[in-house]
Image (spheres, rainbow, N blue to C red):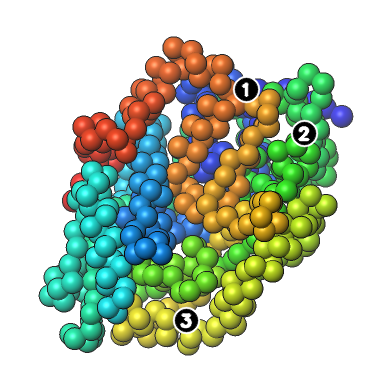
Amino acid sequence: MSVKKVDVLLVGAGVMSATLGKLLAQLDPTLKIMMVERLGKVGHESSHGLNNAGTGHAGYCELNYTPELPDGSIRIDRALEINSAFEVSLQFWSYLVEQGLLPTPEKFINPVFHQSFVWGEKNVAFLRKRFAALSAHHLFEEMEYSEDHAVLQKWMPLVMAQRDSNEPIAATQVKHGTDVDFGFLTRKLVKALVKLPNFELQLSHTIVGMKQHADSRWHVRVKDNDSDKVRTVDAAFVFLGAGGGALPLLQKSDIPEAQGYGGFPVSGQWLICHDPKIVRQHTSKVYGKAPLGAPPMSVPHLDARIIGGESVLLFGPFASITTKFLKEGSVLDLFSSLTSGNLKPMLSVARDNLDLTRYLVTEAFKSHKDRVAALREFYADARESDWELASAGQRVQIIKGCDKKGGKLEFGTEIVTAQDGTLATLLGASPGASTSVQAMVEVIERCFASRMHSAEWKQKMKEMIPSYGESLDENVDLLHAVRRRTLATLRLGS
């Protein structure tokens, strides 16, 4: 059996692996990097344009990132964290554009106003408090708020059409929001990597086994899906960036840090409109409030999107229950992920989240008429014939063991690393791709710690990400300087 020796093995050809590969290649061009993907295409699962919201999650419009606490106050720390992380992504993408390593920005990122919209007195009161809390912070200082029907008619004419003038409504708006085609971005990142002499891309290859040897290196068995031939990759460092497929791979690694982790898979669908006459009438992203018991990925939103160069409107997503971890996965994924270490946490989560399960089952049985009825809360004139159903991506929410309840369901993302720093895995879903650069910088800090302490790597990181090592949350002047540069470089200014 042939053995290929590499410094870095990236599993999965999505935006996470592509970002990590590009960062490492910039930090040390001599690193031998291999990327392995089970599908025949790059960025075709979670990173594909239709398989994520493309929002450029920055906390501007996503109401689930700012929950209302029992005392009536609004918690904003999660929104600040996500906004700062997205600014890190914008800095890295700006650097790559300036270096000619990414194409002109409008190919993968475009300015789209980010708006939140609510109706009913209780929800209006919530949004008013949310605006007050966020706009007081420099990260959100440019946010606008209005309860005036005439103002909102200008902000979101499609949403305001035929709306009762006596209905209590409110909206917020940030003009430098974005729409990102993460599928296109991923393909361009990988295309730039393929040009490097020390990078190798293997499509249609599946990981069938992995074991760490006494020298701390990983021997990973990789099968060619076309020929069924298996070879071994000897890697100093392995990154499992396979989206929903990361958990089963983490379990194959058998590292102690993997114990107790399980996954709760959720699928989704969009309503999509291609009609230019309708698409031209709505040029923003409008997020509402999620139904009670819904997972974060099910926050309803009417989105102006540019996917593969085509302007479309998406509404949804409509979540559904599934046992598959990947869109092109197996219905046995959930069952094969059960182990003696995670069975108790998973059963505990199933017991404590019956409302969520009922919600997902209900969503799964909605008809096209039902889905368009939900759309009409945002777009009253929507006709069933103008919208078609399209599959969104699979997401696997994290289940973790805990002492009090036996298990808990996490709706964010989490990086799991081996104690010796030779393996890292990204688990979870939202905010996902938007914070890919920050997440991969964290992987490098954990797993290449000694090299990150060198002056050379620190200097290079600062060149790629000017805010590196400093807090955009705390440094007002730095945030303003960084944002001026990224908005200009990526052509996002209003």
Circle 1: element type: loop
Question: Where in the figure is residue 197, as x and y percent of width and height?
Answer: 57, 22
Circle 3: element type: helix
Please identify the quadrant where the N terminus is shown.
top right
> Where is residue 96, by image quadrant?
top left
Q: Which of 1 and 47 is in front in this view?
A: 47
Q: Is residue 456 left or right of residue 161?
A: right
Question: Where in the figure is residue 222, as x and y percent of width and height?
Answer: 77, 38
Q: Earlier in the sequence, mark 3 or mark 1?
A: 1
Estimate how packed mark 1 is, as few (under 14), some (14 to 19) or many (20 or more) residues with alpha carbons within 10 Å.
some
Which residue bears the numbered disc 3?
A: 371
Question: Where in the figure is residue 357, as x and y percent of width and height?
Answer: 63, 73
From the viewer's perspective, is residue 374 above or below residue 302? below
Estimate how packed mark 2 is, as few (under 14), some (14 to 19) or many (20 or more) residues with alpha carbons within 10 Å.
many
Q: In this view, does 320 lie to the left or right of 117?
A: right
Residue at mark 3 to residue at mark 1: CA–CA distance: 49 Å
Q: Which of marks 1 and 2 is nearer the N terminus?
A: 1
Count of marks, rendered view: 3
Type of amino acid under label 3: Arg
Q: Which residue lies most toward the front here?
A: 71
Which residue bears the numbered disc 2?
A: 220
Give the residue at x 45% y 44%.
435
